[in-house]
Each structure stands twice: as structure tokens, then as C-alpha cells.
Amino acid sequence: MKSIEVKNISYTYPDGIEVFRNISYSVSGGESFGIVGPNGAGKTTMLLALSGLIDIAGDIIIEENKINKKNIREIRKKISYVFQNPDDQLFMPTVFEDISFGLEKLGYSDEQIRTEVERSLEMVSLEGFEERSSHHLSLGQKKRVNLASAFARNSGILLLDEPTNELDPKGRRDFIELIQKFKGTKVIVSHDLNMIAELCNKVMILNNKKIESMGETKKILSNKKLMEENSLEVPCILK
Amino acid sequence: MKHSFWDNYSTIKSPVHKISPGIKLITAFLLLMILAVLPYRYLLWGAPAITVFLLISTLISKIPLIPTLRRILIILPIVVPVILINSVFMTNGGKNSLVLAIRSFLSIFTLIILISVTKFSDILRTLRSWHFPKILLMILSFMYRYFFLLTDELEKMVRATKMRWGKRSGLKVIKVYGQILGILFIKSYIRAERVYHAMVMRGFNGNGDII
Amino acid sequence: MHIPDGFLNLPVLLSTGAISGAFLIPSVNKINRESTPDRIPLMGLSAAFVFAAQILSFPVFGGTSAHISGAVLISILLGPMSGFLITAAAVILQALLFQHGGVLTLGANILNIAILQSFLGYYIFRIFSRKFYSAGIIIATFIALILGATICAFELILSGTIPLKEGLIAMISSHIITGFIESGVTLLIIGMIKKLTPKLLELKKI
């Protein structure tokens, strides 16, 4: 089954710069899909489009439902989005309140919320962090709370924007392992090509308003010429 | 960046910290009320009683005494000029000034203890259960959450300026600080858009949804 | 200008509290009715900005310092009721977290800082802004601040805390420099926004 289908989408930023022209692709259920490309290629914009956060031309179909104004709230229940900057996402004063924010909107009871928060914090090895203040957490802890919040919602699709950005090597390694715990469909946007090579089975190079190349991760990322043409580099683990 | 915020002690575990935040808020409010309305002759024995109560609370709640007492002095720059004006220009100045000093010092002591034994997020939760306007509580919650970050950004920009210039004063500084604040405001506005996206992705749908 | 607890008597505490409450309820209702969902984080972040801006000390000659309140700035950008709520929230947080101002005196401090500056500042600006945009900002900010300080002085005078003549003179004169800084900075920031993110000037004014 196709988890995400993108049909002929085009998008121009409000300031008039065109970013996508007639892009189409699809991601199958359970797949890990990487999106790479130079700065400004529209990688984050692509995630915003998949979430229905920007008005694009063309169709996006999430688990067989075409996104429109009416169903977007329902569709977003199927998607969890981990933003690049953990502070933008961790907007409630305590960890518990932050994770429960998304669960209350799903109609969970107080009891269910407590259980889910506890379970999801355990999954990211932050047991007992419920009452911690958001602003006192380290960057790595903030990112893990973001991920816990995604786990708690039990959605089928996980969008990750630069998940390993600014983490130290150990924190990066731990975080990659936590991402692997998510069994649904993953779409990962990143410059960390080693991580993409490790996590994704399929990858797409986004550049010059279009898909420059798409296919099996190893094949694409080890193509030196292709990578350099798109301001990328063959990741070490494929050399 | 480490923040020495005055609610740092609110995470200590003690019998006082365990008391329900509602009770602590009401107690503090009553103490402040008593201090505000008690006339001079009762204040003279009421003040020592309240002081003893506050000191005992400090000890039981395991918050450090000396920094707490030192913290009270932050109102000196406000209290001293007012008392000076009062005692020099007003009839009955001596008695008046004494009352002012007792009231203001004990009131601030009360507030310091309250915030040291109660988490700010618990205060918000309690006010919510008392039906305070949700929108105001939401603003307070965001403000508490993001104030730290914005202050860090602000400090970085100010430090960068000072490194280029050293210490200066005058119109030029006001202009540059103003520009720094302008940039900070625009950054905050852009961040608000991203926070909104994050809220929407977790099911937020507007005012009725504010928790 | 944040009055601590212990400086005001009961009649002044009650009446300023009542006035602030009377402004709060309709403002909350109107904002709930008219604002779009994205306005909630916007107001929250604006409030965090105001709070951060308030702790930046501007060095003034003679080794003293001044800080801005940001009330008129926010009202010009978001509207008087939003400006009022945001500034009121800042006053509340200052009292609780920094013990800067009191809790019983919240009514008075919200009146002097949030209500007077947001509403007065906004409407004075609106009167002048058609013909004299920049001058309007300066005049609105300055008058609103000085009036806030004057009302603050009267609250203290009515409570018997400071004497009439000397109290008024001290209060107003000490706010003149702050008033100039606040007006200049407000003008500067709005000028920057006009140049860099003009859409911020077109936000709905509530």
C-alpha cells in the first residue's frame, strides 16, 4: 500500500521564488524515505507540503485520502512531525504537558494520557522526566521529548527534519537508534548523508525545482558524479 | 546557558513543596492582605508573628536561608527613596516609614517563599482550575517557556556589540540596542509561525482548544 | 514604576483592581471571538519578547539605567486589547518570578503600565498616524508613559505613601528620560519592521 503519494505538485514562495515544479513521487507503507539536496532546495518545504501546512498546487494523498481543507485535521492525526529546532516544538512549560498536548486533542482520557506519556518517555530513555521544565533540558533531551511526543500519538507516518542536527556523536548515535524504533513510514530530510544511508531504503535528490534522481539509497548516494552535481558528497559508509 | 531563576528551588522535595499549590497561593494571598490592612498598633506584634511563620516555612522547605534573605534586598532601590521622601516631607513620617518598610519587606519575603516552594507550571494549572481567562494563562505559559530562549539570543547579540565597542553610553548605544530589540522581535515573530505549525500538527485548532 | 506590595492602601488596591478587571473581561472576550488560531503563539512569543526586552538595561548618563516596557510598540502592531493582555501578562510574570512589583498591587501596576500605555498609546498613535506617522509614534509612546507614571504617583499619594507635590515631581521627572528612550526605541523598531517584514504591520489589530 502507498503511504504517501505526491502528484504533480508545484509551489512558489510568497516572495515569488519558485521551489517545486510538477513533482511526483510516492512512498510505500513502512518505507524509510530520505530527501537530500543542497541548501534552499526546498527539503523542509516538502515536509510542510506533506503536512498540509502550505498551499500547493497539485495533489498529496496520505494513506489513500487526498488532502483538502476539510479533512486536513483528520489526516494530520496520521502524521507526526519532528521539527528541526526542538524548541519550536516543545512549547509547553513541562515535559508532561507538552506530550499530553497532542494526546488531549486525540480525545484520550486522563488515565490513557498518563500511561501513554510514561510509555513514550520510556521508549526514548527519559523515564521519570514528566515534571521536568522544558527550558532546563539539554538539546538532546529536548529532541528525545519531541520523538516521545511523536511515539505517543501512535501515528503511521513520521516526518523528521534534520533529526541529527547539532547533536554530539554519542547523542547522534542514540537518536538514530531511537528513530529505528518507529515502525511506520518515515520521511527524513537531512544533510547527514551517513545517517540517511543507514536509515533509508529509498532516497530522493531534490534540486533545481525538481527531483534530480530517486531510487535505492546505496545506488544514488554512491554515485560520485551525481552527488557532486548536487552539492552533495558520497557518505563515508558507502566509500 | 544556566539561568539563575528565582523559582530554581521549586523543584526541591520537602513537606512544604508537597502541599497543594492552591493552598499555598491562598495562604500567600491572605498574608499579603493581612500585611496590607493591619493598622500600626497591630502590625507591631503581627509583623514578628508573620516573620516567624515565614522563617519556619523557609527551614521546613529546605530552601537556603541566606540567599532568600539577601533576595529581599532587591526592593531596596524602590523602598529607600520612597521612605526618604515620606519621612522628610510628610507629617507622622517616622511612624509611616516604619509601617511602609515592614509591609513591603514582609510582602516580598512572602512572595519569595511562595515562588520557591511552588512550581510556576503548578501555579498556572491552579489558576486554570480557578477559571482564570485561558488566553491570559496561555500567554503566561508561552512567555515562561520562551523567555529563557529570547533572553539568551538577546544576550548573545548584546555581547557581540560590546565586544566590538567596549562599554559606551549615549545615543549611539540606545540606537544599537533598539536595533537589537528590533531583530529580536522579528525573530520572535518568525518563531511564532514555526511554533504554530508544531501546535497544528498536534491537533491544535484555535481558541477553544487552549488548555 | 512597578509598585511593590505594602505601598498602597486598601481603597486604592480595590479600585485599581476593579478597573483592571473591568478592562480584562471585555478584552479577553473580544480576543477569543476575533483572533485566528495562529494568533495565540504570536501573542505568546510577543509576550516573551516584551519580557526579555524589559530586562535589557539601557545605560543612561550618570551610571544609571533604564528599561523599556514595549507596551505601545505591541499595541501599535497587534492592537490595544492584545497589547494590554500581553503587557499585563508581563507585569504578572515580573511580580511572580522576579518579585518586581507585587501581587496585591497587580491591579494598579496593570492599570499604569498595561492599560494606560496600550490603550492610550494606541489611540493617540491612531489620531496622529495618518499625517505624521513617525511623530505619532513618538508622541503616543511619550505621553502614554508619562501619564502612566502620573497615575502611578497619584495611587501612591492617595495611599499616603508619598506627598503630593514632591511625589509628583519626582515621579514625572524620573520618567522623562525613560520616556525619550522608549519613544526612540519604539520608532526605531517599527521602522525596522517596515523595512524588513512589512507584513507584520498588517496584522489584525484587536
Image (spheres, coloured by chain):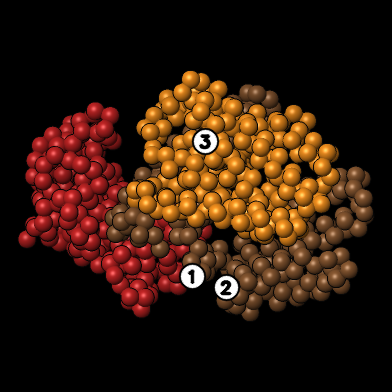
Q: Quadrant of residue A199?
A: bottom left
Q: Is residue B67 visible?
A: no
Circle 1 is placed at which residue position? Answer: B129
Q: Nearer the viewer, mark 3 or mark 2?
A: 3
Picture colour for chain B? brown
Left or right relative to A111: residue B181: right
Residues at marks 3 and 1, CA–CA distance in whole angstroms: 33 Å
Q: Are marks 1 and 2 in contact (CB under 8 Å)?
A: yes
Residue B140 locus on image (x, y percent): 51, 55
Ranked by sequence position, the earlier of labels 1 and 2 is 2
Image coords of residue C190 (percent x, y): 49, 29
Q: Categorize mark 3 by other alpha carbons within 10 Å: few (<14), some (14-19), many (20+).
A: many
Residue identified by numbered label 3: C122
Look at the picture and state if B143 lies above or below A228.
below
Give the amino acid type for the residue marked by disc 2 in the picture. Answer: Gly
Judged from this view, the residue extending furthest toward the top is: C131
Give the secondary structure at mark 3: helix
